Image (tube, helix red, strand yellow):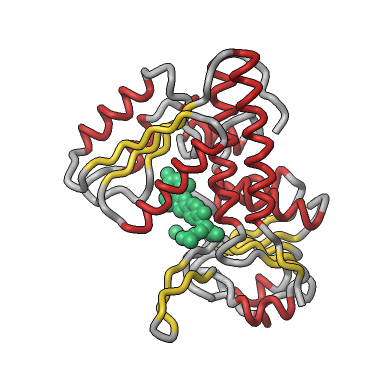
Amino acid sequence: MAKVIDGKAFAEGLRGRIAKAVDSLKSQHGFTPGLAVVLVGEDPASKVYVANKAKQTVEVGMNSWEHKLPAETSEKDVLALVEKLNNDPAVHGILVQLPLPKHIDSMKVLTAISPAKDVDGFHVVNVGKLSTGQDSLVPCTPVGSVMLAKDVLGSLDGLEAVVIGRSNIVGKPVAQLLLAENCTVTIAHSKTKDLPGVVRRADLVIAAVGRPEMVKGDWLKPGATVIDVGINRIERDGKGKLVGDCDYASCEKVAGAITPVPGGVGPMTIACLLYNTVKAACAARGIEQPAM
Ligand SMILES: Nc1nc(=O)c2c([nH]1)NC[C@@H]1CN(c3ccc(C(=O)N[C@@H](CCC(=O)O)C(=O)O)cc3)C=[N+]21
Ligand SMILES: [Mg+2]
């Protein structure tokens, strides 16, 4: 039976430290970090995430702005809003919720965000800084995933890590972070030959493919640490259910430690977003970042 990695509790602790940092910025420097979130369209899951982000932003004492635009908003209008937020000194972080409607070029929108306010860490400037080992705003889900892995394993030095999925949002940046932690990193994807065989080499598995319950227990090396980034909504026994990219029932029998879904990586994503907002705010003000 694997140890269950409690991301919800870890994220709560991190948010507590962020709230203290925000307090000290208010009392010692007289300003409040602020996050603006842009949501285009009516996707129900996106609406829930954006509402959670806003709620937790306010809970740690920061300013929060939600910009909700109709699905048919033009790319030009989204870019104009981003430009307005770039120029607003009260806004330290900007997040444009993905996915965007098909008529909008998301790469163009992400590139329009000022790299200094890019709290998702998706701008090419931040991607380049991460891959060259420079200080940058780092994508939230990857950072949260590595924090959980380090919490159970301590040092990741020399471990065999297999990342399943090569997205710009999780797979590629998490691989960079693991490399920086001195892991030997393999990035597997849909064209990988003998995926179970590749995964079986791993001391640390990061599953980020977006396929419900794909990774099975018999793919794992006994004792492996499993970080499940997947959030998939499925129907089971006539009920809606949230499952990861790992088949939890079989994986928890073989893994040494595993993140549940929900309650694993998901809550870490929002906590790391708040962390990045404080970081961006301190950099904008030219002051040292409080410990978090
Ligand atoms: N620009 C951008 N940045 C993002 O970071 C981003 C995005 N777009 N689009 C959508 C995805 C998804 N995402 C999640 C955040 C929190 C949970 C989360 O808190 N999950 C909880 C509960 C989930 C639930 O009950 O629905 C959990 O796993 O325990 C999940 C998913 C951020 N995303
Ligand atoms: Mg992909």
Q: Residue furthest bottom?
A: 237
- Residue occupying the point 35% across, 30% down: 112
Tell me which image quadrant ligand 2 sits in. bottom left
**x 37%, y 40%: residue:** 96
Residue 82 figure quarter: top left
The x and y percentages for residue 210 are 47, 65
Q: Position of residue 14 (x, y in %)?
A: 67, 42
User: Left of 12 or right of it: where is 115?
Assistant: left
Does residue 83 appear left or right of residue 114 in this picture? left
Please say if 90 is above or below 138: above
- The residue lying toward the viewer, choosing from 126 and 28, is 28
Residue under the image location 57 percent in, 52 percent down: 267
Please tell me whether residue 112 is drawn above or below residue 249 in the rendered image.
above
Viewer-side residue, 228 vs 167: 228
Front-most of 120 and 131? 120
Residue 104 visible, this angle: yes
Identify the residue at image location x=77%, y=47%. Answer: 182
The correct choice, above or below, for 251 with respect to 59 in the image is: below
Q: Specify whether residue 166 is in view.
A: no
Can you say whether 113 is above or below 73 in the image?
Answer: above
Quadrant assignment for the N terminus: bottom right
